[in-house]
Amino acid sequence: MPARRHRERAARLRGDPGGDLDQAIGHLLIATLTPLAVEAALQVSAELEHRAAEADALRAAHVQRAQYHADLARRRYLAVDPANRLVAGTLEADWNTALRALNDAQETYDKARREHAAQLTDAQKARIAQLVTDLPAIWNDPATPARERKRITRLLLTDVTVSRTGDTITAHVRLAGGQTCTLTVPAPLPIGDQRRTPAEVTTAIDELLDQHTSGEIAGILNQRGMVSGTSEPFHRLIVDHIIRTYRLRSRRHRLRDTGMLTLAETAAAHGVHPHTIKAWRRAGIVGAQRYNDKGEYLYDPPDPDNPPDRPKIGRRPKHS
């Protein structure tokens, strides 16, 4: 099992062409196995059955002739005078030869009948025609398991030879009836390119970071119907990963660039305890903006020309 997982992972990393090629082969099977083609195949089958019946009649006649010669040789041998040993020996040899010829003819006849015994009945032909009509619906039905499509493919295909040249995948397909076909599909992008975040998503995140946290951005992107490079809906961790991967400036850095202060810096600027700054923020005394989804804030710097006349918010005095 570990070796199988390793092979599957290696196939993904090099860009496995399976998806596009399987789809192309499915279209080929549906296009080839049409009711008209099956009707022609059944007509050919009927002609082959007719020829097989003629050959069977010839082999049966050969058996009958061999039986006649064996019976004739037996009667001659039994009719000879036993005293005439020379003639009796010759007739016995002729009888044995005729028996061997009869045995060979019978074996050939029986073998041929066994090989050509599987002939289609009218009911089987009607069922085949119905299955061909149903094949596109069965093949394209999302509820059809992949193993069933593989079984259908094994019945209809003899072999597929695949080669890759540059950006093209070429498949030489041989059907069970002997027909051949060549399919060409574009080679898949490397797995890194397949999973790359679309440029419009990266641009949107870069713009939204000026006003929103990663969690808020994920919700906005989902509302817009956008998806990640892995076709998943967005959440905070995916947005954070894109910010790091594409080296976008974080929301914290952007707010710091506008002059906003940390909690400690704001407390020092006002000469109060950091807990007081938090209380002031909740009370709307100081302005602040959340820069992540953990509830952490950056604060507006104090205005030196308009110092706030704000009482310190602390513990209430104890009453005796």
Image: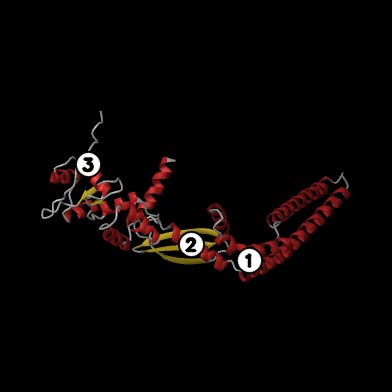
Label 3 amino acid? Ile
Which mark is in front, 3 or 1?
3
**For the residues marked 3 and 1, what is the alpha-carbon distance in whole angstroms?**
81 Å
Q: Label 3: which residue?
A: 313
Question: Distance from label 3 to label 2 (Cα)?
Answer: 69 Å
Circle 2: element type: helix
In this view, the residue in front, 117 or 296, is 296
Q: Which of 155 and 197 is in front in this view?
A: 197
Q: In this rendering, would 83 be left or right of 280? A: right
Instruction: Assign a secondary structure to mark 1.
Output: helix
What residue does disc 1 label? 133
The answer to whether one can see residue 205 in this image is yes
Query: What is the x, y in percent for residue 197?
Result: 32, 58
Q: Residues within 10 Å of mark 3 (few under 14, many from 20)?
A: some
Residue 243, horizontal then vertical, whole percent:
27, 53
Residue at the spot of label 2 = 23
Q: Is residue 243 above or below residue 183?
A: above
Chain-order first, disc 3 or disc 1: 1
What residue lies at 82% left-to-right and 49% top-to-bottom? 87
